[in-house]
Image (cartoon, rainbow, N blue to C red):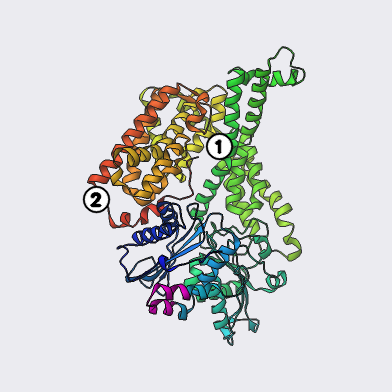
């Protein structure tokens, strides 16, 4: 492995710009100029995306922007000592020591180990003092080389600091508290190991037996089960899911971000001890998937928990809908539209080896249609099951699926699935939180929770709620039946606005779930729902297409080089109905991008409904043209909305001033999830 840093990658006391984006761009350019990256803009964009997810400023004037990127050829460090410092989001002020950590997206374990070793050095005052005193780039290289050549695998728990005598606040039953911790960040390179060392050091200061398992990209060494068994509490300082969380089942848990593990280890230790002494403290679930720490923190509000569960349910439902819808569309393509009524008869009378009077093409159409229809049968149960999973993890799946099946049986549709899933999730979550004897704990997720949760949720659906929800669903269908003329166009406008409001967030998901949840009824013969599906898909294609048009054709100078590169990719993403292509633009400039996209989406939704375009496919964009009637008019609707949105965003960028919050990308980062997709 070549040297991870060279003098050419070091900048001492030079001006690299006035904000952190400029510093990242400048360091990425050094990496590319050294031949260690193929594309400086792509590397900078990946590092900036990580920065927007969670700022990388650390206490003590340090910042470590970092990324795994396909543009990186070999693991590399670029360093800048800044005068004056630049704000990277640390609470104690600007950073004057900035390391850009660049790793290939397929980095080998040895590379990741070296980068992780360096990250641990940031916790040593002698190392940072040496960087501030260095007179030449060569001295910096020598310091870094010495730091990364230390022994010991970063995948193992760091050595404990000398333990002080514990005071009464850190005692449990007259002995020092025993705490285990897991640290993990999105890239698993820097924050993971810095948090591990900070917590270990704090345990030594407090006289607490604290052992950490850093779960990095280069792997991890699992804690001895005996150590976990003896622990009084567990700390999950993570930004991603804990691996094998079932090992900590039943332990009082404190959940926090990995950055808090670096900045506030004393508070986390104190909270863990308090949790250990509290019989009603939150505990790690007894199931394998129950400790999903990346999304369900102990301090999460109930409203946020429900919102997350709804998004989880829709996300897991989509593959059933997308796969089933495309199979049905292919069935129509091969067997004609009468295949919806003839499939069962054809499959009952024919086989591949004895077709009888049926042609091979029609028979294959019947096969595809039937598989798709059966896939659609899981739509409401999957929605309900994974809503419950989002609230209570794996113990909620069985009660949720059963409640969804009951909703389908009663004609309550996807609305019933949502209600049934929430009921099942509440029941499973409550049951899962009960403090039961150890001998009973193993039966909870596999017997008791499915049994009692199903009785509660499905019983309420059958006895009380199913009938009123079915009535509401019928009323909604009747209202749609009565829409004509302007009413249809208004519905298209509303759907278009919703699809473009948050690019995969809750509002977008409601519109998409409404369309896909009723797609089966549309395929069965009610074309109103096929029109809704076409309008929703068309409007969802507008944001990436509009940003591609604006950034690569209309006025390239208004956009940064990374945005122009994103714009090139957004053409294909938009054509495939993946709104994700517009998220980088919205995150950086939400107050000018989102309103423009909503305007374009409203135009497209209105025109699609006015043209009476129908779609039998729930996803795929232009690539499922065979499932879209009036395809050319549908393209006209998309093109019109794309042009309106693109020229609107260009006009706003030229003439509308941005607020400071927008300049810093704060609002955009909060409102638009980088992981969201339109589907």
Residue count near mark 1 (Cα–Cα under 10 Å), binned few <14, some 14–19, many ≥20: many
Q: Which label sits in the foreground, 1 or 2?
A: 2
Q: Work out which residue is located at the far bottom of the displayed protein and give it.
A: 165
Q: Which residue is mark 1?
A: 414
**Mark number for residue 422?**
none
Do the residues bearing badges 1 and 2 touch, measured as CB atoms within 8 Å?
no
Q: Is residue 619 left or right of residue 389?
A: left
Q: How far across and how far down the image is residue 475, in percent? A: 49, 30
Q: CA distance from mark 1 to mark 2?
A: 43 Å
Q: How far across and how far down the image is residue 202, in percent? A: 54, 78
Residue at image x 75%, y 17%?
A: 349
Q: Earlier in the sequence, mark 1 or mark 2?
A: 1
Image: magenta residue range: 128-142
Disc 2, SS = loop
Is residue 138 found inside the magenta-colored segment of the image? Answer: yes
Nearest the viewer among 344 and 398 is 344
Residue count near mark 2 (Cα–Cα under 10 Å), binned few <14, some 14–19, many ≥20: few
Q: Is residue 64 left or right of residue 282?
A: left
Can residue 412 be spotted in the picture?
Answer: no
Q: Main secondary structure of the magenta part?
A: helix
Q: Which residue is mark 2?
A: 657
Residue at image x 50%, y 73%?
A: 145
Is residue 315 found inside the magenta-colored segment of the image? Answer: no
Disc 1, SS = helix
Can residue 512 be spotted in the picture?
Answer: yes
């Amino acid at each position: 492995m070549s040297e991870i840093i060279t003098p050419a990658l070091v900048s001492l006391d030079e001006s690299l710009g006035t904000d952190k984006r400029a510093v990242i761009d400048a360091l990425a350019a050094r990496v590319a100029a050294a031949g260690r990256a193929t594309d400086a803009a792509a590397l900078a964009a990946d590092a900036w995306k990580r920065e927007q997810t969670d700022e990388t400023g650390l206490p003590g004037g340090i910042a470590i922007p970092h990324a795994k990127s396909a543009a990186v050829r070999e693991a590399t460090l670029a360093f800048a000592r800044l005068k004056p410092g630049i704000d990277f989001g640390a609470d104690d002020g600007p950073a004057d020591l900035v390391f850009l950590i660049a790793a290939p997206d397929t980095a080998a374990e040895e590379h990741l180990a070296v980068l992780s070793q360096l990250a641990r050095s940031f916790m040593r005052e002698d190392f940072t003092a040496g960087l501030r005193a260095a007179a030449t780039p060569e001295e910096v290289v020598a310091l870094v080389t010495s730091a990364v050549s230390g022994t010991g695998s970063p995948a193992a728990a760091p050595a404990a600091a000398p333990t002080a005598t514990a005071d009464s606040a850190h005692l449990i039953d007259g002995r020092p508290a025993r705490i285990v911790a897991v640290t993990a960040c999105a890239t698993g390179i820097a924050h993971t190991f810095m948090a591990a060392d900070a917590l270990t050091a704090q345990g030594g200061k407090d006289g607490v037996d604290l052992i950490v398992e850093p779960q990095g990209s280069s792997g991890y060494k699992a804690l001895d089960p005996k150590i976990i068994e003896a622990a009084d509490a567990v700390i999950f300082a993570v930004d991603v899911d804990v691996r094998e969380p079932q090992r900590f089942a039943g332990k009082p848990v404190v959940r926090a971000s990995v950055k808090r593990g670096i900045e506030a280890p004393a508070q986390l230790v104190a909270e863990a001890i308090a949790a250990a002494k509290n019989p009603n403290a939150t505990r790690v679930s007894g199931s394998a998937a129950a400790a999903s720490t990346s999304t369900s923190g102990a301090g999460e509000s109930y409203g946020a928990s429900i919102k997350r569960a709804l998004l989880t349910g829709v996300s897991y439902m989509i593959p059933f809908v997308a796969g089933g819808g495309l199979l049905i569309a292919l069935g129509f393509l091969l067997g004609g539209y009468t295949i919806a009524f003839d499939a069962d008869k054809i499959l009952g009378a024919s086989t591949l080896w004895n077709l009888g009077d049926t042609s091979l093409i029609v028979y294959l159409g019947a096969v595809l249609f039937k598989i798709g229809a059966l896939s659609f049968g899981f739509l409401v149960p999957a929605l309900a099951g994974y809503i419950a999973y989002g609230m209570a993890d794996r113990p909620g799946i069985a009660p949720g699926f059963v409640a969804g099946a009951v909703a389908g049986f009663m004609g309550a549709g996807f609305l019933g699935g949502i209600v049934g899933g929430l009921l099942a999730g509440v029941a499973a979550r409550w049951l899962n939180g009960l403090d039961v004897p150890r001998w009973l704990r193993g039966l909870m997720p596999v017997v008791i929770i499915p049994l009692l949760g199903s009785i509660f949720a499905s019983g309420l659906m059958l006895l009380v709620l199913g009938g009123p929800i079915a009535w509401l669903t019928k009323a909604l269908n009747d209202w749609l039946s009565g829409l004509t003329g302007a009413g249809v166009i208004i519905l298209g406008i509303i759907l278009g606005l919703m699809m473009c409001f948050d690019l995969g967030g809750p509002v977008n998901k409601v519109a998409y779930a409404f369309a896909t949840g009723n797609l089966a009824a549309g395929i069965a013969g009610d074309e109103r729902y096929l029109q809704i599906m076409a309008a929703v898909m068309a409007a969802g294609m507008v944001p990436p297409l509009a940003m591609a048009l604006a950034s690569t054709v209309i006025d390239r100078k208004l956009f940064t080089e990374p945005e122009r590169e994103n714009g090139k990719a957004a053409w294909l993403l938009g054509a495939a109905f993946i709104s994700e292509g517009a998220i980088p633009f919205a995150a950086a400039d939400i107050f000018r991008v989102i309103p423009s996209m909503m305007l374009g989406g409203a135009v497209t939704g209105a025109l699609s409904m006015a043209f009476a375009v129908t779609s039998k496919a729930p996803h795929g964009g232009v690539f499922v043209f065979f499932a879209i009637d009036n395809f050319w008019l549908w393209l006209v609707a998309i093109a019109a909305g794309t042009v309106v949105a693109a020229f609107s965003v260009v006009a706003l960028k030229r003439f509308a001033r941005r607020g400071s919050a927008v300049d810093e990308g704060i609002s955009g980062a909060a409102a638009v999830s980088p992981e969201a997709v339109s589907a």
